[in-house]
Every structure is written in structure tokens, then in C-alpha cells.
Image (spheres, helix red, strand yellow):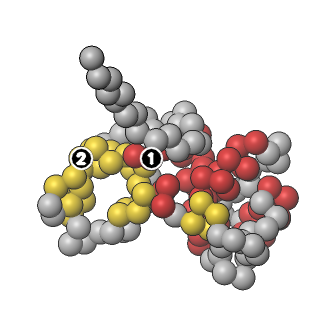
């Protein structure tokens, strides 16, 4: 599974792999229990993780950059329920994160999502889709 296929769906907990799309929604597979379901675009919004940005005290960064820093860190991952511990963790792992503009609920999600992605063995990289090389004879 590729990082670029992972989405968040409003109103549904966790992360999902985008299996397919239809005019009125998407077919998604839960990364937590593996169940496949249809999510209607009338009730849900979809966000590709590769398009999510995080506020920092400098330029905004893509969420994957934060995940990569978390992956490389030797710091122990805090519980997603302890906001103070999470802020202290990110203060060490990603010190330029702007805690005045990044909501507590968002930093909790980052911990939860990171754990889900790690548990599924998904690499923290965005690869461009393979392109076919065309040669002339």
C-alpha cells in the first residue's frame, strides 16, 4: 500500500485506503479493521494525507515531513490522550510546529495516524506514479 492512497474521511474515525471512487462518493478500506465500505460525498469530505499541511513558525510543511521526523526520532511516542505530553514530544521531534495555530485535536490525530500507518507497514514517502517510457523504433 502506498502513502499517497491514504485518506481521512470526515465523520469516520481512523484512516482509509482509497480503493475506488464513484460520482457520489468513494469506496474505502479501513486501515484499522480492513473493512471495505462506501462513503457518500453527500455526508463526508475526503482528504488525501499527502495534501495536508501543518503550520510551523516558518513555512507550512506537508504532514509527511512531520511523520518522517517522528519516524526518525528516538523519542517515545506519547499517548494520544495526553495533550501536554504530545506537545512536549513535538517540541523535541518537530520544534518549529506552531502550537498557536495547530489545534490540540490535530496533534492528537497526528499521533493516532502515525501509529496506524506504522502498524500497517506503510513507508513515509510520496512516490510519483510510475510512468512508461516511450521509445521510438
Q: Nearer the viewer, residue 61 or 73?
A: 61
Q: Is residue 71 left or right of residue 33?
A: right
Q: Which residue is mark 1?
A: 4
* Residue furthest front as drawn: 137
Foreground disc of the pair 1, 2:
1
Query: Where does the C terminus fall, quadrant-wise?
Result: top left
Q: Pointer 2: residues within 10 angstroms few (<14), some, or many (20+)?
A: few
Mark positioned earlier in the residue sequence (1 or 2): 1
**Point 73% across, 50% down: residue:** 69
**Gap between marks 1 and 2, in whole Å?**
13 Å
Local secondary structure at mark 2: strand
Percent of width and height locating residue 21 = 22, 52
User: Which quadrant of the structure image shows residue 12?
Assistant: bottom left
- How many numbered discs? 2
User: Under tag 1, what secondary structure?
Assistant: helix
Q: Which quadrant of the figure contains the N terminus?
A: top left
Residue at 85 percent of width and 58 percent of height? 92
- For residue 128, side relative to residue 99 (left or right): left
Q: Residue at x 52, y 44 (%)?
A: 126
State the residue in front, 84 or 125: 125
Horizontal and vertical percent position of residue 26:
24, 55
Do labels 1 and 2 touch, CB within 8 Å?
no
Q: Where is mark 2, residue-wise? A: 20
> Which residue ends up furthest to the top in the rendered image?
137
x, y percentage for residue 42? 20, 72
Is residue 103 left or right of 36 when viewed as pictured?
right
Q: Would you identify the image quadrant in which residue 40 lies?
A: bottom left
Q: Which residue is drawn at the image coordinates 72% and 49% (left, top)?
A: 70
Amino acid at each position: 500500500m502506498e502513502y499517497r492512497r491514504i485518506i481521512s474521511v470526515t465523520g469516520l474515525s481512523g484512516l482509509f485506503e482509497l480503493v475506488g471512487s464513484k460520482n457520489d462518493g468513494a469506496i474505502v478500506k479501513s486501515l484499522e479493521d480492513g473493512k471495505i465500505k462506501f462513503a457518500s460525498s453527500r455526508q463526508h469530505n475526503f482528504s488525501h494525507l499527502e495534501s495536508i499541511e501543518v503550520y510551523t513558525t516558518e513555512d507550512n510543511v506537508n504532514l509527511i515531513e512531520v511523520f518522517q521526523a517522528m519516524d526518525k526520532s528516538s523519542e517515545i511516542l506519547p499517548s494520544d490522550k495526553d495533550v501536554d505530553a504530545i506537545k512536549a514530544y513535538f517540541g523535541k521531534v518537530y520544534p518549529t510546529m506552531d502550537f498557536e495555530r495547530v489545534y490540540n485535536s490535530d496533534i492528537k490525530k497526528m499521533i493516532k495516524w502515525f501509529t496506524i500507518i506504522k502498524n500497517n507497514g506503510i513507508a513515509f514517502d510520496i512516490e510519483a506514479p510510475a510512468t512508461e517510457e516511450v521509445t521510438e523504433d
